[in-house]
Amino acid sequence: MRADLAKLAGEIMAGGGTMPVYLVNPVQMTSFGFLPNIAYAVVDTPAVPAGTVIAVDGPAFISGNGSAAVDASKDATIHEDTAPAPIVAGGTAASPTRNLWQTDTLAVRVILEVAWGLPAGRSAWMEGVKW
């Protein structure tokens, strides 16, 4: 584990970076408890696949966003699912659905354009780690 982390940090430093930040799956995060002193920040997120470790140069991370478009409605019908489908498709109705008017409910939607990036050489990753 130490060799893997050192290799990733070395790649960041070779690219001109100064402070690696490790991004890991919560499965890998438990292994960091076995390291008494770690010099760099570690962020755990399920967005990183298990067995993958990503290193980025924290100070070089760039992000920005545009203006938000906010909509509200009391007259919509929505499919309440993390992967919503059309309300009716091919004669099949999505489930579960909610009619906001019938349930005296308000829905709010926010669309925000965001972007982020890193200069070349300021990221590295490793797949298939076993720790």
Image (spheres, helix red, strand yellow):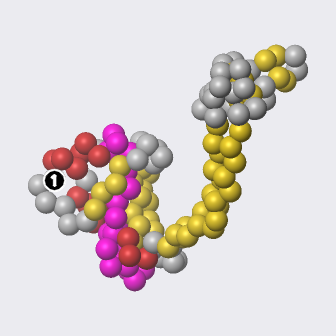
Q: Is residue 69 left or right of residue 129?
A: right
Percent coordinates x, y for residue 2 in the rendering? 23, 58
Question: In this view of the protein, can residue 60 be seen by the observer?
Answer: yes
Given residues 64 and 100, the one toward you in this image is: 100
Percent coordinates x, y for residue 22 in the rendering? 34, 60
| Quarter location, residue 69 | bottom right
Question: In this view of the protein, can residue 129 be seen by the observer?
Answer: no
Q: Which residue does the image show at 78% across and 18% down from the upper left?
A: 93
| Quarter location, residue 113 | bottom right
Q: To which residue does mark 1 refer?
A: 35
| Quarter location, residue 14 | bottom left
Percent coordinates x, y for residue 106 in the rendering? 64, 34
12 vs 4: above or below: below
Percent coordinates x, y for residue 102 in the rendering? 71, 20
Q: Is residue 81 left or right of residue 29?
A: right
Q: Is residue 25 left or right of residue 6?
A: right
User: Which element is circle 1 on?
Assistant: loop
Magenta stretch, residue numbers: 8-28
86 vs 49: above or below: above
Q: Is residue 20 magenta?
A: yes
Q: Which residue does the image show at 34% across and 54% down from the upper left?
A: 43
Given residues 14 and 68, the one toward you in this image is: 68
Residue, far left? 36
Placement of the C terminus among the 4 image quadrants: top left
Q: Is residue 44 left or right of residue 120?
A: left
Q: Which residue does the image show at 33% across and 69% down from the upper left?
A: 20
Q: Is residue 112 magenta?
A: no
